[in-house]
Image (spheres, rainbow, N blue to C red):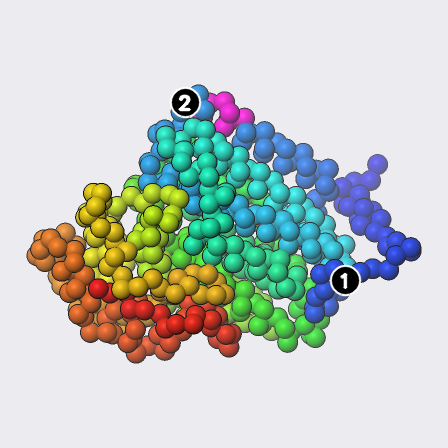
Amino acid sequence: MPNTVEAHERVKDLEWSPSFESRRDRYPTKYRIPPKTKDPFRTLIREYVSMEEEKDDRQYGSLEDVLARTNAPGRAQRRWLEILKALLPMVNFAEYAAMKACSQLVDTVANQELRMGYQAQMIDEMRHTHQQMYLNRYFAKHAPDPEGFTQGMKLKGQNLFGRASRSAFETFFMGDPIEGVMNLQVVTETAYTNALFVSMTEMAAAQGDDVTPGVFLSIQSDEARHMANGYSTLAAVISDAGNLEHLQGDFDRGFWRQHNFLDSFLGAINDYSQVNRGRSYAKKWQEWVAEDWVESFVSKLEPFGLKAPSDLPLARERVPWMAHSVFMVAVGGWPLMYWRQDPLTDADMEWFENEYPGWYDQYGWFYEGMREMQAPGSGNPFLLFPEMPPVCRVCQMPCICRASTSTTSASRSTRGGGTPSARRRARGSSIRSRAATWASRPSGSSGTGTGSTSSSSSRGCSGPTGRPSSPSRTAPTIRR
Ligand SMILES: [Fe+2]
Ligand SMILES: [Fe+2]
């Protein structure tokens, strides 16, 4: 009986090509991959399946048994449950797209070591789609307000942000399969899955949701292997110098596409869906993306010719502000969404001002407008916008992310003293008058408006350097 290592080697030797048919390039790639490289992780499918089966038994068993009998979803904060209605269907498409990408890679990459890894990941991703759909169904059955969970999979296809999520995650399998690896394993899984699954697990537990953490941690436990797939593929690509001419451009584009959606999406969920608040998204981004991913992962590849994404400095500049700007569109456009958005309380606004100094002067008036327009017939915060922001034809996001560092310093220098509630009392109660005050600021202090003098102000929401930026109109100033 061979040991595991020998059995693993023997399985790879069983590769064969049919003599009766020549190989077709169904998903052609411009990259050359060596036929033999290092194995990302040595696991036989038999061991893999029993390991995953055990995880599934634990998860589904606890969901069906004790959590259902104790009415666990009923104890969770409603604000948090509402955002799960958007999160679960959108992330579920990412899992499906990842599964499809891995099956393409098995077809494209003629390297048995890498194929073993892609095959296991493909099964993982299929398992993740099932877990998340089960969780969505679970909430549809047990949540106090199931509306949204019951229809999320259907409605996300027509929803503004559902369409944007699809545009971001389709990059996993559209185009060259190795460019898909840049988007999926190298950027999304290595840089962002901590900010998604680990962060959401922590937040769910803090909001009294005992159901989601078990599912998300089970999913995240597979991600280390997926990151290893990305690293091994990168190592194989870099080993052929002829690939380098393509690699940096594909990597830069992958980073920009995922940053543009994920930093808005995860930032909004992190900062606007918690009642019992933890760290801000900006701090999590600094730890997981800027330090762990850029400084520990990407920098190791620099000696081999791969540099940090060219638009990383711009992304760093946008992260503290972009989610707040984009989320205004979700809040103001509530009749078009299939989830409810809880208004911000005074305590929330204090938290925002502490975590993002200058937030209140940039966004406070808008989120107060939302609070004041709760009663039927009292208006809609969207009416404070002079027009709908255009939607980018590439990333499908509203073109509203134009904050720059000059904005931040300007807003800090012009804001009044005291806490948000003290400043609010000093300014009177009319949201429209506060909106007008905000609009009358010098243009350089407008967080989302035109007129900033920073170099980033000329950049639309899509397209890294050198890529076509597709909005057909100039991004509007969000002001009254
Ligand atoms: Fe996954
Ligand atoms: Fe994954």
- Magenta stretch? 61-67
Q: Residue 449 versus residue 193: which sits nearer the camera? A: 449
Q: Amino acid at mark 2?
A: Thr
Q: Is residue 190 left or right of residue 277?
A: right
Above or below — where is 245 with respect to 386? below
Above or below — where is 212 with respect to 313? above
Q: Residue 458 versus residue 59: which sits nearer the camera? A: 458
Q: Position of residue 211 (x, y in %)?
A: 45, 33
Q: Main secondary structure of the magenta part?
A: helix
Q: Residue 462 versus residue 10: which sits nearer the camera? A: 462
Q: Position of residue 135 (x, y in %)?
A: 49, 35
Ligand 2 has an atom within 8 Å of the beta carbon of the residue at disc 1:
no
Q: Is residue 356 left or right of residue 312?
A: left
Local crowd size for mark 2, using a 10 Å CA cut-off: few (<14), some (14–19), many (≥20) = few
Instruction: Find disc 2 in the rendering and name its residue.
Output: 70
> Most extreme residue toward the top, as rendered?
69
Q: Amino acid at mark 1?
A: Asp
- Tell me the quarter of the picture where residue 434 sits: bottom left
- Residue displayed at 48% across by 65% down: 393
- Residue displayed at 70% across by 44% down: 43
Instruction: Find disc 1 in the rendering and name its residue.
Output: 25
Local crowd size for mark 1, using a 10 Å CA cut-off: few (<14), some (14–19), many (≥20) = few
Q: Is residue 282 at least partly visible in the picture?
A: no
